[in-house]
Image (tube, rainbow, N blue to C red):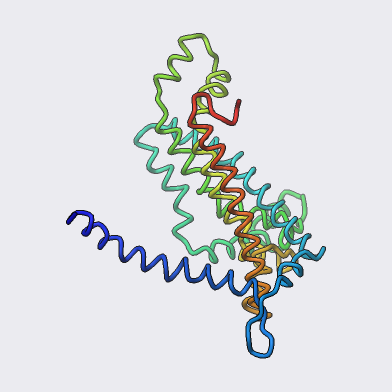
Amino acid sequence: MKRQKSQSRLATPYVIWSALFIVIPLILIVFFSFTTQVNGSYVFTLDNFHKFLAPMYFKVVKRSLTLAVISTVLCLIVGYPTAYLITKAKPSRRGTLLLLCILPMWMNFLLRTYAWAALLGKNGFINTLLGAIGLGPINILYTDTAVLLGMVYNFLPFMILPIHTALSKMDQDLINAAKDLGANGAQVFTKVIFPLSLPGVVSGITMVFMPAVSTFVISKLLGGGQYYLIGNLIEQQFMSVGDWHFGSAISIFMMIIILISMAIMNKYSNGSDKEGGGLLL
């Protein structure tokens, strides 16, 4: 009994923190999304959600989901081999290689994104290098390509770390057994290594897709304000327009998208705990 009381006391700060910064803000967002102000009073309405169904906002949602999916796939393509190579490196070098992957995250997010704006500019390092080899300057900044590069650069560590964790915890006896049974390198990877690393892959996909679909800083700085995403639209409604009701409705919609994606990833993650990996069945 005393132990339970002591545990409840230890959990009190966490409960207070969650209530102040998670539960109450969420309640306020739900309240504002279903109301509007009429003569100084709040009136229940669904107009905020109906407004979001306009074709112009559908294009914003489509662009946000497209860029988020592409950036997630690119992070997986780059992140999985990187995590695999780190796992195969000498134990004395693994810590250094992981540090190099995490090191950019020690810098402020805005500074990292501003750095890419300088690199991709007309007089930036990349165009200077291309001009030196005779390919001429290329207009990269303020395009979808620049936004994708910013997303991949900023969110790539979130893909590498969970995959590396899954690979490093893998039972090497299973790999050795597959080799002893005559499996070649490709078969060992497709039948043993990749299925066993699926929990890390699923975690990485979730951790990259969620911030990618909700980002607004990257698209604002590298897209030049020309490429609006859902995050930019929400920021505009709260910070510029002052329409908290419509901004809250968009936030609810984005939370639904994130929850659906998490539910799908969680389903596959549960399946991958079975032998062989649920995604390959």
Query: Camera-side residue: 143 or 139?
Result: 143
**Residue 259 shows up from this direction:** yes
**Residue drawn at (70%, 74%), measured in percent from left and top?**
45
Query: Camera-side residue: 125 or 171?
Result: 171
In the depicted structure, whether residue 238 falls above or below residue 268: below
Q: Which residue lies most toward the bottom here? A: 39
Image-quadrant location for residue 151: bottom right
Query: From the viewer's perspective, is 155 left or right of 93?
Result: right
Q: Quadrant of the C terminus?
A: top right
In the depicted structure, whether residue 251 falls above or below residue 92: below
Query: Camera-side residue: 120 or 64?
Result: 64
Query: Percent position (x, y) of residue 107?
Result: 47, 61
In the depicted structure, whether residue 136 falls above or below residue 53: above
**Residue drawn at (47%, 56%), measured in percent from left and top?**
105
Q: Which residue lies most toward the right here? A: 55
Q: Which residue lies most toward the left here? A: 2
**Residue drawn at (53%, 13%), measured in percent from left and top?**
183
**Residue drawn at (48%, 71%), measured in percent from left and top?**
24
